[in-house]
Image: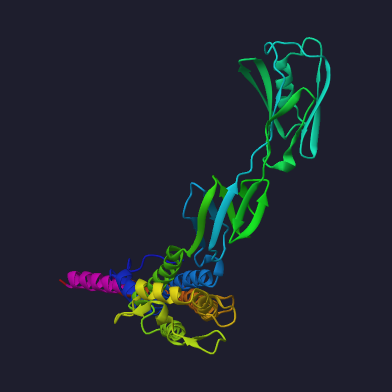
Amino acid sequence: MITAAGAGSGLNIESIISQLMTLEEQPINALRRDISELSSELSDVGRLKSAVSDLADVAEKLGDESKFGAWESTSNDEDVLVVSSAEGKTSENHQIEVSELAVAHRMVSNPYESVLTELPVGDYTFGSGEESFTVTLTSGLNTVSDLRSAINDSVDNTTVQASILNVDDGSRLVLSAVNTGTENVITAPPEFTELTAATDAVLEIDGLAVTSSSNMLTEAIPGLTIDIKAVGSADIVSNQNMDDIRDLLKEFTSSYNDMRSTMDNLAEGSLQGDSIIRRIDSAVRTDFFTPVDVGDSSEYSMFEFGFTFDKAGVLSIDETTMNESFAENLTRAVNVFTNEESGFASRMVSTLEEFTDIDGFFDIREEAIAARDKALDDQVLRLEDRLELTEARYRRQFGAMDALVSQLQSNGSYLLQSLSSANSGNN
């Protein structure tokens, strides 16, 4: 048991032992500093891995052709037609001439004295196009108003809408087809006659005739939806949305600069002089400075598309150069970035994944740090055990010395007392 020392001799043995243990603890304190530095190194490696992974994620987006700016199709006269394009739609430019709109068929009943006029009870069958349904009027629920409600409320009816008009010659029941076009003509009992003839939309696209039962054309030009509004002429013009391209390249630029900033900060900390930063920087810059060959007998520098580095290594985009390169040959420009075999994006992703993949450089580095940390922890545990034994040994040694000094002091006191008594007797 460790006890207070020096009680017998009066020496400050606790202070002596404390100073000796401070010297003994120097190796373990050095190990603890090493462990703290390893913890900082592991944290910094994690920060760098995250920055590289973020750049790899953006580089993957850079290789996705669908992210490279959708085409926007517009009409030069939206009073005649409105157009929209599907995602990923490419360039479309067309001349449209609309000569007739699609119109829904309408029928009207003979005039009734009022909406409360009673109709014969029984079944009434209606329809539009290929669909039909039957409603039944029963005694007490057989007025003109009841027939309108029965038509509109029928669960089998999806094609005909009924309404009532109170006009000069009385109340009339009007049937309107839900869908336009001649293929959706209404069928009704004989007391109904045609009010509005059904017509199809008739137009020409680039001089070629197109007929549609609907004013909303979704298949005439694949990928485009044309909503006809009026008779007349309009041009459909498609343009690449350069905002999407600019935003994508700027996102990549920003992510690259974030990674560089992280590397610069870490190079002044626990990763100062570390080869990992030089390796990443060299690999990524090599991808920028190596021309891209997509198999068309030409090589393309990334700087042709607006990328530029300043003296500090900060990446930016020259939008004028970017716009000119994409405008010159859009398909080629997109292919330089997105080609699966040799495009810039796939090359950059491959480079970065050498560091970020499972069993990649970062995993190997983190495993090495973890192994060193465990080895140091084991050394600390062994030294702590040894320190405890050393302190116990010091206490035993100084305890024995303390007891010896105490005994000598006691014997000396006894001898002095004896001599003093002898001298007193002689006198």
Residue 324: say if magenta.
Answer: no
The reply, left or right, for residue 360 in relation to residue 106 is: left
User: Which sits in the foreground, 136 or 80?
Assistant: 80
Q: Main secondary structure of the magenta part?
A: helix
Residue 425: say if magenta.
Answer: yes
User: Residue at the location (61% across, 59% down)?
Assistant: 223
Above or below 282: residue 127: above
Q: Which residues are magenta?
A: 409-426
The reply, left or right, for residue 103 in relation to residue 346 is: right
Can you name the residue that lies furthest to the left here? 427
Res. 366 visible in picture: no
Above or below 79: residue 414: below
User: Residue at the location (76% across, 13% down)?
Assistant: 141
The reply, left or right, for residue 224 in relation to residue 133 is: left
User: Which sits in the foreground, 133 or 167?
Assistant: 167
Res 140 quadrant in image: top right
Residue 75, percent from left and from top: 49, 55
